[in-house]
Structures are given as C-alpha cells and as structure tokens.
Amino acid sequence: MVVAVVGRPNVGKSTLFNRLIGRSLALVDSLPGVTRDRREGAASLGGMDFTVVDTAGLDEPVKKAAVRGVRGAAAEALAMEQVMADKGVLSAMLEQTTAAVRAASVVAFVVDVRHGISPWDEYYARWLRKTLADVPSPPHLLLIANKCEGSVADELMFSDELDNGWSTAAARRLGFGEPIYLSAEHGDGLAALYNALAPIH
Ligand code: GDP
Ligand code: MG
C-alpha cells in the first residue's frame, strides 16, 4: 500500500509524513510550509506497514499567487486558474506530485481545522479528481483534518462549526467523505487513520 499525502501548503503534510515514518527528518523547516523535495518513507501504524509519500507540488502555485499579492477569495480563485495555467509553474515538483497521486493506492488529502476549508483546498480537490479521472484503478481518497488537538479538538466534540472558520459541512463538500480528525504534531487521532487504512491494506 502506498499512501500519498497531498494538500495546500502549511496544512501539515510533512509533519504527518514524519509522524508516520516515526522519524524527524529535516522536512519541516522553521519556516512553515517548507518541504525540500518529494520524500518516500517506510511507515508503520499499529503494526501495519506501508509506504508513505510526502508531496510539495501543490505548495508552489499557492506560494506564487501569494507572491503576486493575491488577497481574498475572489482574487484567489482567479489567481488559481492563472497560476495553474502558467506552464512555467508546471515544474518538476508538480509533475512529481501528479505522478505520486496517480500511482498511489491511497491519497490522503490534508486540510487544516485551524483555518477551515480554503478556496485552494476546493481547487485542489477538483484538481485531484481531474488528475485521477483516467487512472484505471484510482486510489482510495481520505480526508485528513489535521491540527486537531487541544481546545480545537474539544470544541469539535460539541460543534460542527468553529469561530476560526472550520465547517464540517464545507469539509464534507470536498467529496472525500467524512473527515478523519487527527493531530500530526501531537500524534492524536492516529487510531482513526488506522481504522480508515486497515480495510484498504
Ligand atoms: P506542509 O506545508 O503541508 O508540509 O506543512 P508542514 O508539515 O511543514 O507544517 C506546517 C506548519 O503547521 C508547521 O509550523 C507545523 O509545525 C504545523 N503543524 C503541523 N501539524 C500540526 C498539528 O497537528 N497541530 C498544530 N497545531 N500544528 C501543526
Ligand atoms: Mg511540506
């Protein structure tokens, strides 16, 4: 089983990768959202062994849009189309990420419960479906709601909507099923991830 971890920058993809391989490679920079390159590692979860792939190809377009000074949802939506259509952006890294999701048996699409679903999350959810449309046996898709620890985890037990912008309904609308809540940094909620992966493995 090969699990590819994807999502917009800064949602905690590399932190989850590190958690799953049980080591702290120099993948998470002191600057948030920095991944040096695509990495593959041997993961172990509850005695279940699999391969995990960290990706960074979807980080780049968002960063390019940010550099162009894009602010706000409408401007962001426009920038996404422009940036993704820009051949200069279709770098080796984005190609690697595309190859990784197409070859995976599971794609873990990571979002951030501390920010809620962003236009980029929605854009990449569509990107993922398009990218997998012609794959003969497409991977299983899992939605990981990361950064779920502490008071945020407590609040989520009582409410589907948080003041920080998180909405469980918006997360479900991405079309990857029920979010799996966990904290890659603290190691909370990994049993839920195990339960989702075990039937696939
Ligand atoms: P990536 O860009 O998606 O690979 O994200 P990183 O793994 O580099 O993490 C981005 C930032 O989010 C870093 O500052 C991490 O420490 C932080 N982060 C990652 N996972 C968690 C988590 O479970 N909880 C919290 N609170 N922060 C996290
Ligand atoms: Mg990263």
Image (cartoon, grey):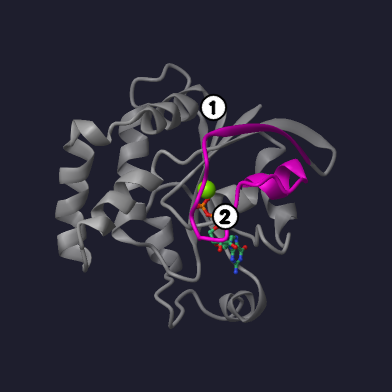
Q: Does residue 121 appear in the picture of this structure?
A: yes
Give, as a three-letter code, the residue at label 2. Answer: Asp
Q: Residue 29 carries which label?
A: 2
Q: Is mark 1 on a helix, strand or loop?
A: loop
- Count of numbered tags: 2
Residue to which mark 1 is pinned: 104
Residue at 50 percent of width and 60 percent of height = 32
Residue at 48 percent of width and 74 percent of height = 160
Q: Which mark is residue 30?
A: none
In the image, 16 versus 193, the foreground residue is: 16
- Report the side of 185 relative to 171 (left or right): right
- Report the side of 156 relative to 24 (left or right): left
In the image, 90 versus 173, the foreground residue is: 90
**Most frequent secondary structure within the magenta stretch:** loop
N-term-proximal mark, 2 vs 1: 2
> Does residue 22 show up magenta in the picture?
yes
Residue at 69 percent of width and 35 percent of height = 199
Q: Is mark 2 on a helix, strand or loop?
A: loop
Q: How much space separates mark 2 and mark 1, taking CA atoms?
A: 26 Å
The range drawn in magenta is: 17-44
Which quadrant, please, contains the C terminus? Answer: top right
Give, as a three-letter code, the residue at label 1. Answer: Ala
